[in-house]
Image (spheres, coloured by chain):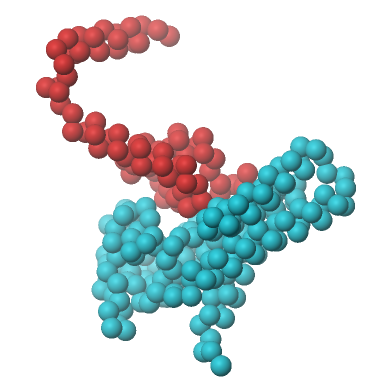
Amino acid sequence: MIAYKFLSRGAVGPFSGFRWPTPDGGAAGPWVEARPEDGIHACRPVDLPYWIDEELWDAELSDDARETSHQLVASRGRLVRRVEAWPEIARAFAAHCSETVRARVEAALAAGGVTAERAALLRGYSGDAEAFARAGNVAAAAFAAARAAAVLAGDPEGFAAERSRQAAWLERALASARLPRA
Amino acid sequence: MSATELSCRELVELASDYVERRLPLAERTRFEMHLCYCAPCRVYLDQIRATIATAGRLTEDDLPAGSRETLLAAFREWKKTP
């Protein structure tokens, strides 16, 4: 199974600190076996917004890969290729999150009926998303946009809905990046 | 806050269990998802790890003279208070 895997700079696991062996000369990297209590973790497209980091890779997982909350877990995995377009997509995604939340907040405030407390929250999240996007903190920009969506919806499910929308945006952008250029 | 989100306060409470690998997968997932977007909590976790690493190197011989009795007296008093 091929899945997405986010890593920190230098193909380093952001939580384990493990430096992944990388592909060489077009061939996939060597298989890495995880400790049974840990597992190799990767993303489906729907999971992408939750795990954003500096590098994005295509990774192959062993046949025992299973779906868990917000990720795939397998006993073995290997890096297949780096998604070279990721830095550009990430910047565009952060800008998109910031612009989307600003537009939605402005529309909600213009429509009226928003309490002062909610308005302050919404302006705060919108400002945060913009600042994070400008600073290159993509994960935080997307998170701020999702928090704003929850407040706009008046329901925590607004957060999940925004994350789904973000995942769809990322999936389209990544698919588009793989198309051969004319 | 959505069901999957962890607040910074909750993360702080779980940090030691995370570092010592005692969290179940679902909780660990929520913990790591929070770290993805929260730089201050990443710094906090690094500090916890550094503290554990440093404390792990200390031995009783590292204590200055008299410190052992002072610490034991403090712990006895702490145990007395409800």
Hey, which residue is sitting farthest bottom in the picture?
A182
Task: Residue at 30% x, 72% y: name it.
Answer: A22
Task: Residue at 34% x, 65% y: name it.
Answer: A11
Hey, which residue is sitting farthest left in the picture?
B61
Residue A34: x, y in percent? 29, 61
Count of numbered circles in the view: 0
A57 with respect to A102 (left or right): left
Residue A99, above or below B4: below
Colour applied to chain A: cyan
User: Quick one: A64 or B6, which is closer to the camera?
Assistant: B6
Task: Residue at 36% x, 42% y: name it.
Answer: B46
Q: Quadrant of the C terminus of chain A?
A: bottom right
Colour applied to chain B: red
Hey, which residue is sitting farthest front in the picture?
A134
B67 with respect to B51 (left or right): left
Residue A119: x, y in percent? 77, 43
Residue A60: x, y in percent? 37, 74
Snapshot quadrant of residue B71: top left
Snapshot quadrant of residue A61: bottom left
Q: Quadrant of the N terminus of chain A?
A: bottom left
Residue A85: x, y in percent? 48, 75
Task: Residue at 15% x, 26% y: name it.
Answer: B59
Residue B82 appears anywhere in the view: yes
Residue B42, above or below A137: above
Residue A60 appears anywhere in the view: no
